[in-house]
Image (cartoon, rainbow, N blue to C red):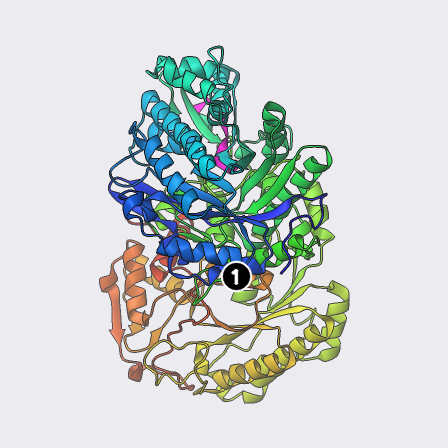
Amino acid sequence: MEKSENLNPLYPEVWAGLECTVNRVGDDYLDQMQLNGHAVREEDIALFASIGVSKMRYPLLWELTAPNGPATADWTWADRRMQLLQEHKITPIIGLVHHGSGPRHTNLADPTFPEGVAEYARAVAERYPWLEYFTPVNEPLTTARFSGLYGHWYPHGKDGLTFGLTLLHQCKATVLAMQAIREVIPNAKLVQTEDLGKTYSSPLLAYQAKLDNDRRWASLDLLTGTLTPEHSMWKYFVDNGIPEEDLQWFRDNPCPPDIIGINHYPPSERYLDENLAAFPEWTHGGNGIHQYSDVEALRVKTEDPAGFYSGHRVLLREAWDRYNLPISVTEVHICGAREEQVQWFKHVWDSCTDLKKEGVNVVGVAAWSLLGTFDWVNLVTRADGFYEPGVFDVRGPKPRPTALAKMLTQLAQGKEYEHPLFHLPGWWQRPDRFFYPFTEESKHAELFLNREESRFGRGTKSVWRNNWNPICETETIPDGDGLTEKEVLHLENTTRPILITGATGTLGSAFARLCGDRHIPYRLVGRKQMNITDPFSIERAMNYYNPWAVINAAGYVKIDEAEEDCENCHLVNSHGAMLLAATCQKRGIQYLTFSSDLVFDGLKQQPYTEADAVNPLNVYGQSKAQAEKYVQDMHPGALVVRTSSFFGPWDEANFLTLMIKQLTQGNTFLAPEDIIISPTYVPDLVNACLDLLVDEESGIWHLTNEGELSWAEFARKAAQIAGLDPGLIQGFSANELEGQQAPRPRYSALSSERGQILPSLDDALARYANRMKWANRIAVRA
């Protein structure tokens, strides 16, 4: 499709980027492109081109291409990708080192590192002389902090000298690399990226905040040759052992960026306070003079609704005023719910558009993490497998476009992307974002739990939750003023809602709860407000509520009674679902309804996928299978979710809650050993469904937590995680079950061909146990 360049000169260009970090922790390398699959999937390039980006940050990393030097480089992978980028008319911005420390024989503190980067840069330029844009080293200041000052990445320094060496070596590598490249490509341009933050503090710690705020410009000051002996950072470097001649070298060899690439995330803006009692213990630290808490400024409540932060609008103008060089936002990404990801990109885009109209030369805005990111919530220090979707979601057989892809496609064509949710304020603008000053433990824990269930129930590792750490390193601070609660409520009350049926059921109430936590306007209705078996009642409700989507969480769920009440079961589950589908199709409304694992007969003995033929054994299963057909016939755009046995923190009657009650009293608990299921944690299910609804997905999708086991194994696993005695679980054969009229499959585990987007069962059980702990029902084993 036509690229965004010059389509509308009043707006920045639509750029994109591929999370490609190859960082070293000890002797281990963490390679994002291996994790997201791009390393082996060349067809991604066509996918990226389909959204219409004009420029793309693209990696040709030193560690991967020429680990033993250019003479023995393997260009096979790079040659093919460069060819495809040319064919698809995407202008690449080539990155050579991305949060890495080079091949194993060197590191950021090695004085030969700059020459090694320059040698490789020349080889890249000679092989691809048509290239124009380069980022030899990504975010040198940020990488130096994490590698030389905080000890997160190799060489794991925690002192001013190592920080200074790692920063200067990366900046010198950039200068030497651009010199080498320009000897081959005279018009080559430097796009220098950096994470730009800001620090605020209590009056006592103003001196530390000033040091932090001077330091944030260090890499760009070095490259522009403007770091002089009068600068506070000159004295800082010299005091920490950096020779003055090493600093003078940059004044003698300036290499100002052609474009400054600003990246900005929540940890970038900090607040420092010596009142340790007002902040949780894990935020406590110090500088050798004072002890203080160091927290995200965005989370600190002040009398001003805007709180402590500047955001893109202020920070980009500061960079423009300081350097008067073209600017791009080279990473825009947030970890959170799908509507928040789109709200955030729109917020940044609007800020950049306004700045451009005010005369700031903002040339591009890049959607970062085209294929998502792995483990950035722990700063890529562990391989936990925590995945955040991006423009595409890679948890299926091929990357799946999310709502972000649709938005970018529209923006690249000079159009607006309209959706009822995307004009609402994101969490960064709402008063419920504040965590500090610290409240009493119980209230604070509840706050974190609610936040987890509304945003992080789709894969966050339990070790993070157990520490109750609210930092998510990939969320992004906004600009502009914060909103008052009254202003937020007004915007939500004037936005078209989601209409949710099933007011008295587990699923309907869970959707209402999590829509509330995610600030998605909704209306939860029961039979009195809308009888789904009556077309006139449905029409009246649609006229009254005017929803943009309908979630049908109502249903006849009494499986055994359905054998004697077949007509009513089919009336509600099949006919009602069909009537809703027909009405939604006629009105152009998105529709989500639910089916069951009981549409299968259990003879397969391996997890059922969406493509397997249905063959229900009982009336309930028949009603659901019939509903699937009716709904898809009436509304081809409908989403039909098959799921399995629910467990969750809010339903007193579910299997696990009943089990915990018995075991905490020292009683035994009976569970079948020979019925195999895929249990489903309700918060995970609801969050995934809402994301898919925002993505406008359709068709049948299996959603369960990853794993299959018997009811007895499920109970034992949950008991163990909860610190209870799994020996109290007594297994028995399903043949011994009494009082069941409806036949059930012995095997009904589900898997998905479309994508396993719910986390593992172990992960879900750990979060369930934490919730039970804070409900004072169990004491979680450490």
Compared across the picture, whether 413 is left or right of 69 comes to right
Please, is residue 245 above or below residue 661 in the view? above
Q: Can residue 647 be seen in this view?
A: yes
Compared across the picture, whether 127 is left or right of 334 comes to left
* Between 729 and 143, the one nearer to me in the picture: 143
Q: Residues within 10 Å of mark 1 (few under 14, many from 20)?
A: some
- The residue at 57%/40% (across/down) is 329
Q: Does the magenta stretch include residue 275?
A: yes
Q: Where is residue 621 in the image (x, y as percent from the top left)?
A: 48, 83
- The residue at 51%/42% (across/down) is 133
Q: Is residue 767 visible?
A: no
Q: Which amino acid does label 1 sit on?
A: Leu
Secondary structure at badge 1 equals helix
Q: Give the total number of marks visible in the rendering.
A: 1
* Residue under pointer 1: 47
* Between 83 and 330, the one nearer to me in the picture: 83
Q: Quadrant of residue 715?
A: bottom left
- The residue at 37%/65% (across/down) is 706
* Between 355 and 70, the one nearer to me in the picture: 70
Q: Is residue 483 magenta?
A: no
Q: In which quarter of the image is residue 421?
A: bottom right
Residue at the extreme top = 230
Q: Where is residue 178 in the image (x, y as percent from the top left)?
A: 45, 34
Please, is residue 383 above or below residue 599 in the view? above
Compared across the picture, whether 435 is left or right of 727 comes to right
Compared across the picture, whether 666 is left or right of 390 comes to left
Q: Where is residue 720 in the image (x, y as percent from the top left)?
A: 27, 57
The image quadrant where one finds the N terminus is bottom right
Q: Where is residue 356 in the image (x, y as percent from the top left)?
A: 69, 37
Please, is residue 388 above or below residue 156 in the view? below
Magenta part of the protein: which range?
264-276
